[in-house]
Amino acid sequence: MVSSQRIRVDESFIDAMGRLARPIAERLKRDYNLDELILDYPTMSKIVAGKLNRKKSFNFQVHKTSRNKGKLLLL
């Protein structure tokens, strides 16, 4: 079950989330031959939380929004 909470975070934390999620996004872009992959903040926070909890793999789906664009959905 997913719950959402509003919290205030420093902008540097958002930048750090992007840096941690970037290698995963780049690999998926290459594997699925995409020019653009959209990662929203909740998805990035799940990836960061998984990395901090030493999770090795993620269940995901890439929803293609057009020929060369997609959105990452964690299952």
Image: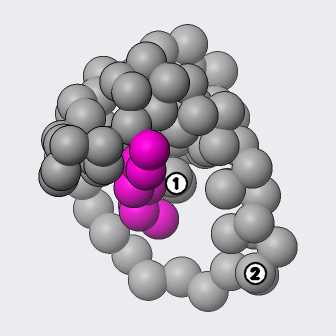
Q: What residue type is labelled 2?
A: Glu
Q: What residue type is labelled 1?
A: Ser
| 58 lies left or right of 54 | left
Residue 1: percent from left, percent from top: 19, 46
Q: Residue 27 carries which label?
A: none
| Front position in the image: 13 or 27 | 27
Residue 63: percent from left, percent from top: 18, 41
**Label 1 secondary element:** helix
Q: Say if mark 1 contacts mark 2, CB within 8 Å.
A: no
Instruction: Identify the colour scheme used.
Output: one colour
Quadrant where the C terminus lies? top left
| Front position in the image: 51 or 35 | 35
Residue that mark 2 sits on = 11
**Magenta range:** 35-42
Residue 15: percent from left, percent from top: 75, 66
Task: Assess whether residue 38 is covered by the magenta stretch.
Answer: yes
What residue do we see at 58% from left, 34% from top? 26
Residue lying at the far right of the rendered structure: 12
Residue that mark 1 sits on = 45
| Front position in the image: 11 or 33 | 33
Q: Quadrant of residue 12?
A: bottom right
Residue 37 visible within the image: yes
For the residues labelled 1 and 2, the Cα–Cα distance comes to 14 Å
